[in-house]
Image: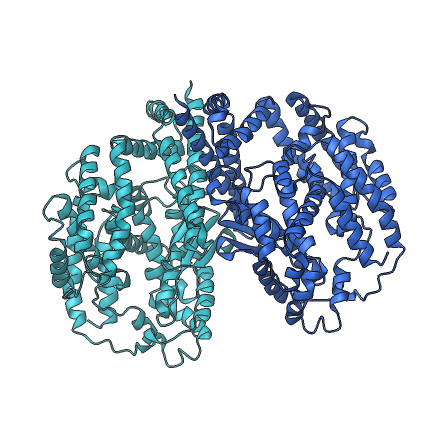
Chain colours: A blue, B cyan
Amino acid sequence: MNLDKKVEVFKSLQETLSAFGVARSLLNWDMSTGGSKKGMNYRAKTIGIFTMKAFEITTSEAMKSCLDVLGANLDELDEITRRMYVLHKKEYEKIIKIPKEEARAYAELQAKSQIIWEEAKEAQDYSMFKDILGEIIDYQKKFVEYRGYEAHPYNPLLDDYEEGMTVEILDEYFENLKNSIVPLLKDITATELPYNTSFLTKSFPIEKQKEFCIQLMEDLGFDYDAGEVKESVHPFTNGMNINDVRLTVRYFENLMTSSLFSAAHEGGHAIYEQKIDEKLEFTGLDTGVSSGIHESQSRMYENIICRSKAFWTYYYPTLVSYFPEELKDVTVDDFYAGINRVENSFIRVEADELTYSLHIIIRYEIEKAIMTDEVTVDELPSLWNAKYKEYLGLDVPNDELGILQDVHWSFGLFGYFPTYSIGSAYGSQFAHYLKEAVDFDGDLEKGNYKNVNEWLHKHIHQYGSLKTPEEIIVAATGKRFDSKYYVEYLTNKYKSLYNL
Amino acid sequence: MNLDKKVEVFKSLQETLSAFGVARSLLNWDMSTGGSKKGMNYRAKTIGIFTMKAFEITTSEAMKSCLDVLGANLDELDEITRRMYVLHKKEYEKIIKIPKEEARAYAELQAKSQIIWEEAKEAQDYSMFKDILGEIIDYQKKFVEYRGYEAHPYNPLLDDYEEGMTVEILDEYFENLKNSIVPLLKDITATELPYNTSFLTKSFPIEKQKEFCIQLMEDLGFDYDAGEVKESVHPFTNGMNINDVRLTVRYFENLMTSSLFSAAHEGGHAIYEQKIDEKLEFTGLDTGVSSGIHESQSRMYENIICRSKAFWTYYYPTLVSYFPEELKDVTVDDFYAGINRVENSFIRVEADELTYSLHIIIRYEIEKAIMTDEVTVDELPSLWNAKYKEYLGLDVPNDELGILQDVHWSFGLFGYFPTYSIGSAYGSQFAHYLKEAVDFDGDLEKGNYKNVNEWLHKHIHQYGSLKTPEEIIVAATGKRFDSKYYVEYLTNKYKSLYNL
């Protein structure tokens, strides 16, 4: 069979995988956004069938034969096909090394584990979760051994969510971050913010919040002809196709700003997915390239744009027009200070921009220790609590607010947490060069988001998964990833806000 | 390989087909109910992939081998597996006899044909559509020859939509119907209805119509925890799973009763799908068995229940509570007469219960003539118009109101129309025996639908596709299908209404 023919087969396998992906996305969307209550079981079963069929295709003889032929002719492939090859080859090598029986047993364990985690969290009792977490960790370590690794056993897990990410890079990154944030935070907690931020917990009618968030996302660039917005308990974005990107927001009557920034955050994810080049449809490259790059875009819109002074200089009157009564005594300076107020807290997902990365550093250091057997499952809570004391000065009162707060480990998501922080850091690096090319503050002060969107589209969004995270960063900024931009951004922003 | 193992493979092939079916249903649902505008192309492409993959499975070597082994051991199969075998075997034999190239060319023709039909209808010009319709008909005839048939070339097409249906059965059925309806209709059109039916075209606020229809469907038995109701231009029901049955209604401000009965009609389809036994999930038998049986249930709820005097005796005050102003001078007798008024008209989908079957008889006679070469495509409009004159006394003014009114032929749906009428006739036969078992009028007059629903569930709904249409009818009524029940029902109802 000649190469062209083989490429055709390869692409048709991918089209089928893409179709299965669409089906799973749709079913998940229905599950999370109010599809028929009694339909949960059949949806879970159908998703299971698609997952299994996708696994069969990914590891099939047909796929292997395509990979062999394409791999021997890499120079003759166009850019898209070559990148498709690289990602499939990687996935194939990863899966094929893990014995099927163990993969199946692990999948069953994952399903059980989430339920046990929920029960343990509810009961605030880590001891209920400890044993199954130990089993999950054992599998993770075994799988890493099967797969093989360079330098550090944590590396393959980091690479699963952030292509090319290593302990070496992250150690340096988190060290720099810690060295600047921890002292800054000490100064901040000793300072009183000279603004009235009592509006933060006042009551704002939900219906008005919805209307405002819909307009905000439209103004930021979300295309309602190529997507949909609904409500759910945990906000998420589901990019089932470039022209069909769905997101959810959750609204709290007494935490309006939380609703607003969840909308801006998911809006950022969604705009990224909508702006991917259509030529990548059905290639498997038509989605954001990594968790980190994705998070860089959600946090670009949430934080760098929507928590900036320049943004609210123009947009605050719009917000006030939705809530004239509620905001009548709140100045734009009060508002800006309120949405950027720093507060040490136990819960990652409620953290402000500055302390957020400390929550991540803690998880990163713990995961690394787990992978090198420096901590046992029994010791995890005390390690957790010690680190919260050290970095955030907090005494963790119970397991629910401590070691049990995140769902991730219950389904074996080790290596994922760092992408949350890395995403913010990527975002700052992008923003640094974006601000060199575009009059960022000037544009935002005029309510003009066109130039910003165009820069992001040109340097990041359009590529989907065609380039690696590192390729995107280097092409957009001329530099490899560097923590200094994020440190600089945080230091400047918070020193200025707190008059330090 | 032993039989058990083979049955397992067979069932797993079916599970995959069921999953593909769910995916296609979901995508279709999105396309018809306001999913992202720009997402039309990717959805069509994804549906195409699933259709192709399903075709591959249905005609695969794996399937053939299952069918061979199961077919040689029919006595050892349980009821569900045997029925699954019968339906798959039939499908396999049908598809496998048609050369792949011709099937593909025909599929392309179908896609083109619908667009041309739309243009021709818009232009009221049959000559634009004639040639491609001729090609479609030629394919249909060729396919029937490939497949082979007994007695009449129209039979395989009838059987496609109504298992076991033949020209012999339909000839007798339609003859009986015609002989009773045509003279009755002559008497009716010579009679003035002594009621005020001007409310039929008055304005009723759409929002109130929606609220009423939602309540009506709930009262009739639709389970909102196992389904969803939206709006669309062409009402339809999409039973993607027993626990996820979705339907649409369309609302007209100046045709409230049309909205109402489209809700009752689709509600009937949906209740049938929701009440299928859960043990049939993922067997391919978890859907209504045929178009005729399905239509018997939609028309059971729409006509036999919701156009009855007994129903409105109880339910009319509820309707009035939604529209107190609009209905203040309309008595329940006026209302009952209005919703059952007979009127000769050109358009099938707007026809009343009595004239409806005449529209179907015309299509049946024309399709039969097509399949036996008794009419050419050139002659179709004049044949159509002559029959409308003969049976309904109408002069068809143009092709849009005549030969071009239905979409069916444009995608090769020959043999489908009869199921619309047969469904009503099945429904009357069911109703006859239902009324022997249940105090039908007494229950409806008390707003009690429980006994009626239970009877329908027990005799029809639960089986899904486990039994053939004929098996269901014989088991439920003790008799084979007989046109006399429908003739009796129509004659009694309309003689009484028109005092004849």
User: Residue B233: in sight, yes or no?
Assistant: yes
Q: In which quarter of the image is the N terminus of chain B?
A: top left
Q: Position of residue A193 (x, y in %)?
A: 84, 61
Residue nearest the observer in this picture, A43 or B306: A43
**Residue at the spot x=23%, y=44% of the render?**
B158
Q: In this view, does B220 lie above or below B317?
A: above
Q: In this view, does A234 lie to the left or right of B193?
A: right
Q: Position of residue A314 (x, y in %)?
A: 66, 66
In the orientation shown, which residue stands out farthest toward the top? Answer: B1
User: Number of callouts in the render?
Assistant: 0
Q: Is residue B137 left or right of residue A77?
A: left
**Residue at the spot x=51%, y=30% of the render?**
A82
Q: Quadrant of the C terminus of chain B?
A: bottom left
In the orientation shown, which residue stands out farthest toward the right? Answer: A190
**Residue at the spot x=81%, y=29% of the render?**
A375
Q: Where is residue B497 in the image (x, y as percent from the top left)?
A: 25, 70
Q: In this view, does A209 lie above or below A51?
A: below
Q: In which quarter of the image is residue A150?
A: top right
Q: Quadrant of residue A441?
A: bottom right
Q: In this view, does B336 lie to the left or right of A396?
A: left
Q: Where is residue B323 in the image (x, y as percent from the top left)?
A: 44, 75
Residue nearest the observer in this picture, A130 or B431: A130
In the orientation shown, which residue stands out farthest toward the bottom? Answer: B329
User: Residue A394: in sight, yes or no?
Assistant: no
